[in-house]
Every structure is written in structure tokens, then in C-alpha cells.
Image (cartoon, helix red, strand yellow):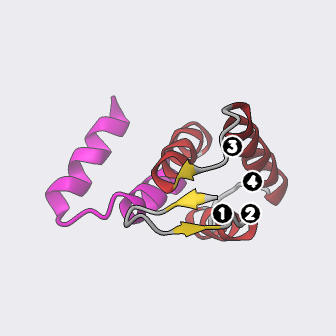
Amino acid sequence: MVVKSDGRRQVYDQEKLKQSLLLACKKRPISTGSLDNLIIEIEGRLRDKSQDEVASREIGELVISYLRELDDVAYVRFASVYRNFQDTEEFMSELEELKR
């Protein structure tokens, strides 16, 4: 089960994760096989915790960490939606962090 930020619980949906990755990686030189492997890695890390529930935030942070290593543009796209930047200053701050 996935615990959303508002406390709701939903059944984990691999397809939802895959769609968000495909959107972040749209028109990037990333194969679907690479994304499938990324999903396997994320699910493996979550399974290793042996918990019945996982916070959606934890899944999001795992995705961000993997995308950051895979492709900078996909990372920024995902982070901008996931972290819900409110203005260009927050967005620029994230880009500066990425440059480091």
C-alpha cells in the first residue's frame, strides 16, 4: 500500500510509476528497457524494507535519486512536478543544486 501525503492509502500501481517516468523522460535518449530496470530497482529497494505500507514521498525521492543519475533533464522535469515548485526561484535553486 502507498500512503499519500494526505493520509489516503492506495494499492501500489506499477503502471502509474511507469507513466510518470515516461512523461519525465519524453523525447530523451532513454530506452524503455532502462525505465523498466529503474522500476525494478525502485521496487526492490522498497521490498527490502519489508513493510506493508510505503509513503508516496519515499517513492518520489527514490525516483528523483535514480533520475538524477540517469538524465538531468528527466530529473528536473520530475522534480518540478513532484516538488511542486511555486516560483522560478525555487526552480533555479534546484538547477543550481544539480550543477553542483
User: Given the image, on which type of amino acid does mark 4 rest?
Assistant: Leu
Q: Position of residue 11 (x, y in %)?
A: 67, 67
Q: Are marks 1 and 3 in contact (CB under 8 Å)?
A: yes
Instruction: Indicate which disc, 4 or 3, sits on the residue closer to the N terminus.
Output: 4
Between the residue at mark 4 and the residue at mark 3, the CA separation in whole angstroms equals 10 Å
Q: Are marks 2 and 4 in contact (CB under 8 Å)?
A: no
Between the residue at mark 2 and the residue at mark 1, the CA separation in whole angstroms equals 5 Å
Q: Which mark is residue 17?
A: 1
- Residue extending furthest right? 33
Instruction: Indicate which disc, 1 or 3, sits on the residue closer to the N terminus.
Output: 1
Between the residue at mark 1 and the residue at mark 3, the CA separation in whole angstroms equals 10 Å
Q: Nearer the viewer, residue 88 or 56?
A: 56
The residue that appears at 63% across and 60% down in the rendered structure is 28
Q: Are marks 2 and 3 in contact (CB under 8 Å)?
A: no
Question: What is the span of residues highlighted in magenta in the rendered image?
Answer: 72-100
Q: Are marks 4 and 1 in contact (CB under 8 Å)?
A: no
Instruction: Indicate which disc, 2 or 3, sits on the residue closer to the N terminus.
Output: 2
For numbered disc 1, what is the local secondary structure?
Answer: helix
Q: Are marks 2 and 1 in contact (CB under 8 Å)?
A: yes
Q: Name the residue that disc number 3 marks.
A: 42
Query: Which class describes the residues within 10 Å of circle 4: few (<14), some (14-19), or many (20+)?
Result: some
User: Given the image, on which type of amino acid does mark 3 rest?
Assistant: Ile
For numbered disc 2, what is the local secondary structure?
Answer: helix
Q: Main secondary structure of the magenta part?
A: helix
Instruction: Indicate which disc, 4 or 1, sits on the residue closer to the N terminus.
Output: 1
Residue 79 left/right relative to 33 = left
User: Given the image, on which type of amino acid does mark 1 rest?
Assistant: Leu
Query: Which class describes the residues within 10 Å of circle 2: few (<14), some (14-19), or many (20+)?
Result: few
Q: Name the residue that disc number 4 marks.
A: 35
